[in-house]
Amino acid sequence: MSVATQQSAPSPTDAPRAPMIETAALTKVYPGGHAPAVDRLDLTVARAEIFGLLGPNGAGKTTTAGMLTTRVVPTSGQAHVGGVDVIAHPARVKQLIGAVSQTNTLDRQLTVVENLYFHGRLFGLGAAESHRRSDELLERFQLADWADASIYALSGGMAQRLMVARAIFHRPAVLFLDEPTAGLDPQSRLALWDLVRELNGDGQTILLTTHYMEEADQLCDRVAIMDHGRILALDDPASLKLTLDAKTVVTIRARGDQETLAATLRGAVPEIARVRPEGDALELQVREAPRLVPRLVAAAEQNDHEVLDISVSEPTLENVFIALTGRALRD
């Protein structure tokens, strides 16, 4: 007697992860605009990924997030969130997403807990479930002691945590964070970073827009560097920094003419890949070089450039942006 062998169905984890966000030639031109705010953007964000859009103000980051969250109508192109066409079915997309904008959008006529409770009711939760979920999130986000307080009583960091709690109340497929730490003090910024990591650890897909290079470096699995509505580079932060062909970034401030100093240092240290003025100092991007600092100081002072200050660091995403655009991220 023969026994047929039954093959088990492939595990869902064996299949490629479906993208949570996809765009194709997504474009936005505002009325009266001379150039597109977003120019033919092709983008794919995977499930459970923290994806960063990094660039200066006006790069197109917020407009991109606006189109994906249905707040901004695209001029042309396509966009899908959770497999749903953003342009054709904006109401369905709103059910799939949570969003935290740059500005405080909490209802100041409601208490802290009411801001959560009524959000749940708006998304169709019953009264008991909305109360339960509100209490759960206030505990998780360390806001339970402020449940009955006015929104005016919250610090900036606490208000930002509450907006994140509200955004994930209905368990969205994708969480959009638009410049989430702008205006926060360093301690509140670090606390929000920990919160973002925790949410992602639970499987939350997050699209983050920021002009803080360290934020993108610390949080994001992949980063798209944007400027003038276009993606200039896209990869994980470590790989982006490797494109610089530099192991070290040195900032040196010395007396004398900067152009003369730059020529002096280039001649003495051939491993210097790029020199850029940085205020009253020079920024040097340097390939691997032995005894780098003593060589730089000796070369400068032998040519009558008294060294006033020198610092050494690893390459950053801002260095990548400068290499791509010729200007600083904060310009």
Image (cartoon, rainbow, N blue to C red):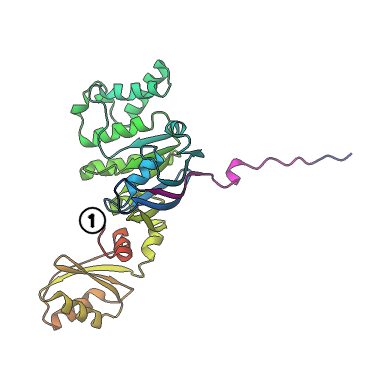
Q: What residue sits 26% from the left and 43% below the top?
A: 181
Left or right relative to 261: residue 189: right
In depth, the one of 298 and 133 nearer the eye is 133
Q: Which residue is mark 1?
A: 330
Image x and y of residue 129, in percent: 42, 19
Q: What residue sits 57% from the left and 47% below the top?
A: 16
In depth, the one of 103 and 261 nearer the eye is 103
Left or right relative to 255: residue 24: right
Q: Residue furthest front?
A: 32
Q: Quadrant of the C terminus?
A: bottom left
In depth, the one of 115 and 189 nearer the eye is 115
Left or right relative to 47: residue 58: left
Q: Residues within 10 Å of mark 1 (few under 14, many from 20)?
A: few
Q: Residue furthest top?
A: 127
Left or right relative to 15: residue 39: left
Q: Residue furthest right?
A: 1
Q: Vertically, is 41 above or below 325?
A: above
Query: Does residue 27 show up magenta in the picture?
Result: yes
Q: Quadrant of the N terminus?
A: top right
Image x and y of residue 202, in percent: 44, 38
**In the rendered structure, which segment of residues is drawn in magenta?**
5-28
Image x and y of residue 248, in percent: 30, 68
Q: Amino acid at mark 1?
A: Arg
SS assignment at label 1: loop
Count of labels shown? 1
Image x and y of residue 161, in percent: 29, 34
